[in-house]
Image (spheres, coloured by chain):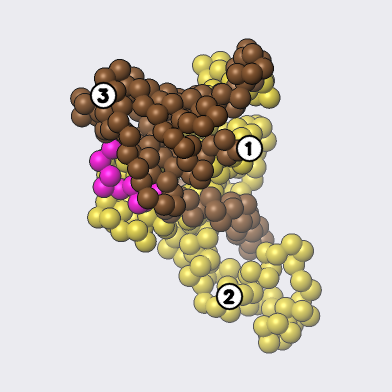
Amino acid sequence: MRNDSSVIALVARVGDGDQEAWDEIIERYSPLVWSICVRYQLNRHDIDDVGQSVWLLLVENIGSLREPAALPGWLATTTKREALRILRAGRRHEHADLPPEDQMPPDADATAIEEEIIVAERNAALRAAFAELPPRCYQLLSMLVSDPPPPYAEISAKLGLPVGSIGPTRARCLERLRRSPHLAGLFGGGPNDVDNLSGAGR
Amino acid sequence: MNTVAEVWDDDELLAALRDALRAREAVPDEFIEAGKSAFAWHNIDAELAQLTYDSSRDTDYELSMRAEDASIRALTFTSAHLTIELEVTDDSLLGQIIPAQAGMIKIQPRDGAETTVSADEIGCFSVRPIPSGAFRLHCRTASDVDALTGWITLAGA
């Protein structure tokens, strides 16, 4: 578990009725709730229902979270439970291939959810670090992660940066990203570790 | 143990950033806005009654009904201390509170003024006409249970 002081601070501010802190929690962790729903193959309407339940339960329970840093885990567990509840509420035939919860292979399922939490925390930290980059780095990296990335000549024209400086600027910007305090709490091996996990989970 | 930032080279870091931004882009804005607006519920001292059954999602139910009754939609909301059962008929919404008891039901439309109906001593109530947009029911019973349903939309009802 990360000891993420920013999550703890956000949870405390929400306890004081701070809507902005709440919004930030939603921005950070919506992708976690969303991706777990997608994993359960819910349709859009059902995902909206699950989302509503999860957020309302969070409003109700956030003051009594014993370990605020465990928020992502709480959200993942709650999302999973709500997704299964929605599936059962319908007992729909298109989900007939979904085994009851007690017959699901517990290890594979737990591993998959654990992986979603790790990925979600890492993604949230990367987005937070990215959002705090100086504008020039933000623009350059935004262009470099687009698919497909534009040719250097185009980047050069857009940012007014000589083509020869793009490589070194890229390196400097990534170094700034790397040194962000948001990433300081993220431990683990290389990205390949999680790729292996996801291969096993699916 | 090293942090991921120390382990990743530039290409891996850029790829991880790409994945992080994609994961956020995959989530529709309305989904996020709905989450933000859920905060309006803090300080509301009611237990949440969640949808636990919806006949429109239940193909067994539709097959088991006679054709003329098949249009009746049934919904069940369950909170810690209360169950609210709803049936949508042609022109009204019939409800029952379980365990049976008297109570007051507020119908709160997402847009528009709320109305109130009372439930009789066996917990039955009716809402007429059927709310046209999204609404929720806030139910306060004789035994002082306070329960609020999630948003309900009876589209096409």
From the image, which quarter does the C terminus of chain A lie in?
A: top right
User: Between residues B148 and A38, which one lies in front from this camera angle?
Assistant: B148
Q: Which residue is mark 3?
A: B102
Residue A85 within the magenta-colored segment of the rendering: no
User: In what element is the residue under mark 2?
Assistant: helix
Q: Colour of chain B?
A: brown
Point 48% across, 70% down: residue? A132
**Residue A107: x %, y % from top left:** 54, 24
Residue B44 within the magenta-colored segment of the rendering: yes
Q: Colour of chain A?
A: yellow
Disc 2 with disc 1 on a shared chain:
yes
Point 28% across, 55% down: residue? A17
**Residue A159: x %, y % from top left:** 67, 83
Closer mark to the observer between disc 2 and disc 3: 3
| Residue type at the position of mark 2 | Cys
Magenta extent = B38-47
Point 64% across, 74% down: residue? A140
Q: Are marks 2 and 1 in contact (CB under 8 Å)?
A: no
Q: Which residue is mark 2?
A: A137
User: In what element is the residue under mark 3?
Assistant: loop
Point 36% across, 27% down: residue? B125
Question: Which chain is mark 3 on?
Answer: B
Q: Is residue A164 visible?
A: no
